[in-house]
Amino acid sequence: MKQHDGARMSRIFIRCGTMAAGCALLFAALPAQAGAAPANPGVQVKDMDKSVRPGDDFYTYANGAWLKATEIPADRSSVGSFLVASNATESQLKTVMAELLAKPVAPGSDAQKIRDYYRAYLDTAAIEAKGMAPVKPDLDRFAAITDKASLSRVLGQQVRADLDPLNATNFHTENLFGLFVTQALTGGQVVPYLMQGGLGMPEREYYLSTDPKMVAIQGQYRAYIAKLLTDAGLAQADAQTRADAIYALEMKIAQAHVGREESEDFQHATTLWTRADLPAKAPGLDWDAFLAGANIGWTGNFAAYQAKAIPALSALVATEPLSVWKDWLAFHQVSQYAAVLPKKLDDDRFAFYGTVLSGVAQQRPRDKRALGAVNNALGDALARIYVGRYFPASSKTRIQGMVVNIKAAFTNRIQALDWMAPSTKAEAIAKVKGIIVGIGYPDTWEDYSGLTVSPTDAYANAVAAGKFDTAHQLSKLGKPLDRNEWWLTSQTVNALNLPVQNALNFPAAILQKPFFDPTADAAFNYGAVGAVIGHEISHSFDNQGAAFDATGRLRNWWTDQDLKRFDAAGKMLAEEFNAYEPYPGLHIKGELTLSENIADVAGLAASLDAYHASLHGAKAPVINGMTGDQRFFLAFAQTWATKYREAALRNIVATNGHAPGQYRALTVRNLDAWYDAFGVKPGDKLYLPPEKRAKIW
């Protein structure tokens, strides 16, 4: 759901109190649905520019005044509704942290671990005093590599399964292989997925592109490698030579990678490789040593997700010089953990990843970064306090009602399709009914009793947290899938669809303004958070999610004719987005963003139906001169109000599965009701003839 994230490969498994599925065909009553007009319309009229015709530029009509008045913070690459909600959550967490720091806590408790992790991260004087000492044992481990077997073992030791599902372009870039743990695509037990990794830049196109802007970034990345090696004391006179060798190795890794389009086609990842298949199909790496180092040597089956890339990456272990691999390992170890090493290294990393790649001029304040670090390491421990303080039961009940309504609307839309065969409809409806919806927080919190946190060693804490989460993920291997598992913390401003689990996660942090306002008119909430809910439900039926059945198994439940019609509708939507051009010559990639765009169209349509049904036959009130449908569509467009730095926008277009916010707001062009609500006619710039409006679900 996030407006721009790197989750393309993970999108196969992660698409953005449990409800009973049997209530999906009933419309739940919500407070303030009909009758007297509520005082709060939700829509921010002050942010609009009514001098613009809605049919010519609906995004500016809804957000023009906001766009003129809003500046991107110096420590951010963009600003928008997601940042508004994130800032509110951050402020709430800051209050929670202040109270934890001020009161006594039980030794060994989660509260103490949160406090110690935070304090160690903030203690930059201690970090400076330690210098490179904390990372020295790891650097010594790399220096001790003498042959392919010891290299393979270390590469295995580096593997982390602590995947951030919202930032997973290459998984952990410091690892040659990423590791993801979930059910096999064909069903059955949980298995390890081997994924391509090993790149320091966002993806292969950053290495392979000959575009002048990309070529400039390539040079800046090589300079970053050399500077980090120098500042870390790992190389002096020969720093650039060694940096060039590291870059050359990463270029070969990039050439071994499969592209995004092929990575999206998960039909190729259904075959499991046995333990014996690994050395037979991917020679070069010493697999015995690698798997032992990764603590998965006992596993019998593996899902080779990018099956073409794994053999090519494995071969590089045998063909590339050990000295370069050792430098590559050292560089990535220091780069990844630069935030908890001396400031000059932290600054070096920010200069490239913050400024060069995203256009951000200023590093975020250390205390805010510390909160983020605690979130990553002890997210559920912090979440338990957060939701108890800031997510009332009344909000959960209200959102549950909206979910019921939108699931019902989606079911009704499936039943009304005139082109879909009864057998396909039956499968689709079963899938909607079977969706497990988590709202606010998980039913079971993660247990951190096995995580040791130092009050004085920030580097040790960061490493320990990664190992702890990896062990947690590996503990699921060989077991049945837990369909109730959450992949986001409650304080994350986002939402997810999990097709393998046929489940949805809606964290508490996105269930607040500007996405949800319990005092606002129903039209606003359905246009804002309702569209988020509809989006995630619709991911179960986008061009990827529709390949999974109600049990989360990859299975074709479509007739050939139905699938052809569905694909044709998707092609039309892709062409619509291909026409958008943020900068001359830079077009949105309609195929790359197709799954998200399908979810936007279908989700918005279902949420509109649910809003209409929630009125129970009453006429929607007119508030501030706006009809109910107008408020609905304006709420949707205002949630996508976004400003980007040019570098960040170019990065999103090049690599992201989500279209930028200003184009997602134009999803409204595909709904007939939008034309009626704003009187959009032929000749208006955004007008699409009825036959060109994507009708998906």
Image (cartoon, rainbow, N blue to C red):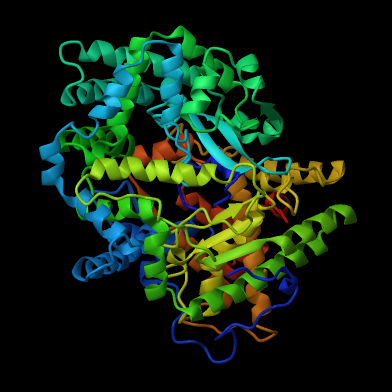
> Between 304 and 557, which is closer to the camera in this rendering?
304
Q: Quarter of the image holding residue 97?
A: bottom left
Q: Quarter of the image holding residue 448?
A: bottom left
Residue that lies at the very extreme toward the bottom in this rendered image:
36
x, y (%) of residue 265?
Answer: 66, 34
Residue 165 visible within the image: no
x, y (%) of residue 36?
Answer: 54, 92
> Between 508 and 128, which is closer to the camera in this rendering?
128
x, y (%) of residue 479?
Answer: 64, 47
> Between 551 and 14, which is closer to the camera in this rendering?
551
Residue 334 visible within the image: yes
x, y (%) of residue 443?
Answer: 54, 66
Which residue is painted at 66% across and 73% down in the image? 405
Q: Quarter of the image holding residue 629?
A: bottom right
Q: Is 31 situated left or right of 560 in this image?
A: left
Q: Quadrant of the C terminus?
A: bottom right
> Between 664 and 468, which is closer to the camera in this rendering?
468
Which residue is painted at 71% across and 34% down in the image? 270
Q: Is residue 486 above or below residue 160?
A: below
Which residue is painted at 47% across and 36% down in the image? 171
Q: Is residue 575 above or below residue 668?
A: above
